[in-house]
Image (tube, rainbow, N blue to C red):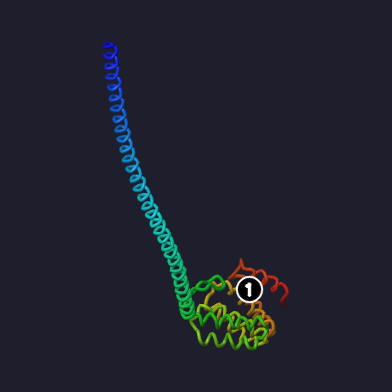
Amino acid sequence: MKNFRIVLAALACVLAFNAHAALFEDDEARRAILEMRQRLDVSQQRQTEELRKAAGDNAQLRRSLLDLSGQIEAMRAEMAQMRGQGEQMTRELSEVQRRQKDLSQGVDDRLRKFEPSKVTVDGREFVADPAETQEFDAALVVLRKGDFASAQAAFGNFLKRYPQSGYKVPALFWLGNAQYALRNYRDAITNFRALVATDTEHLRAPEAVLAVANCQVELKDIKGARKTLEDLVKAYPQSEAASVAKDRLSKLK
C-alpha cells in the first residue's frame, strides 16, 4: 500500500511536470505567433507605404508626362504658327521682290524709250534714238499702204529732221520710190543719186542706180538711161541689178 502511494505520487509529479511543460510550450508558441504577426504587420505596413509611395510617384510621373506632353503640343503649335508666319513673310517678300522687279522693269522700259539703241537696217548697224526709229518706221508703214503722197512727205520731213541719221540711205531710197510712184521722176533721180553719193557700198546702191535709169526712160532720156545702165554694170558687176541692166541695155534702142 505504501508502495502504491509512492507510485501515485510519482505519477502525479510526472503529470504535473508534463502539464507545466505543455503550458510553457503553448506560451512560447503564442509569443512566436505574435512576433510573426507583428513582423508580418510591419512588412505589410512597409509594403503598403511603399505601394502608396510608388503610386504617388507614378501619379507625379503621369502629371509630369502630361505636363511635358502639353509643353510639346504647345511648342508644336508655336512652331506651326512660326512656320506659318515664316511662309507668309516669304510670300510677302516674294511679292515685294516681284513688285520691285516689275517697277524696275517698267522704269527700264520707259528709259529705253528715250535712250539710243543699236538697230540694223539693210545689213548696216548704227545707233538711233527711239523717236528717230519710230518716225522712220511710221513713214515706211505709210508707204507700204500705198499712200505715196503721204510717204513722200513723211520721208522728206524725216531727212530734214535727221540729216545725219543712220536711216539716211534707206530713207532716200524709199523717198525715191514714193516719188517714182507719183511720177515725180526728176526728184526721184535726185534722191537716188544722193543715196549713191552718200554710200556707194550700200546694198541699196545698185538698185538706186537702176531706179535712176528707170526714171530716165520714163522721161524719154534713152541716151542718159543707157549711160546709167552701163555705169551700173561696170560699178556693180556681181549685183542682181547689173543682170537686169544688161537685159535692159539689149532692149534699149
Residue 68, x across and y down, in percent: 38, 56
Q: Which residue is nearer to you in this view: 38 or 101?
A: 38
The N terminus, quarter of image: top left
Q: Residue at 44% of width from left, 65% of height from top?
A: 81
Residue drawn at (59%, 87%), measured in percent from left and top? 154
Numbered disc 1: secondary structure: helix
In the rendered view, does 35 fall on the left or right side of 231? left
Q: Amino acid at mark 1?
A: Glu
Tell me if 149 is positioned left or right of 94 in this view.
right
Asked which quadrant contains residue 41, the reply is top left
Q: Within 10 angstroms of label 1, few (less than 14), some, or many (20 or more) residues?
A: some
* Residue 8 spot, x, y in % from top left: 29, 16
- In the depicted structure, whether residue 7 falls above or below residue 71: above
Kindly identify which residue carries mark 1: 230
Between 32 and 69, the residue placed more toward the observer is: 32
Of the pair 60 and 98, the residue shown nearer to us: 60
Up/down of 216 relative to 123, above or below: below
Q: Residue at x 29, y 31 (%)?
A: 27
Is residue 2 visible in the rendered structure shown here? Answer: yes
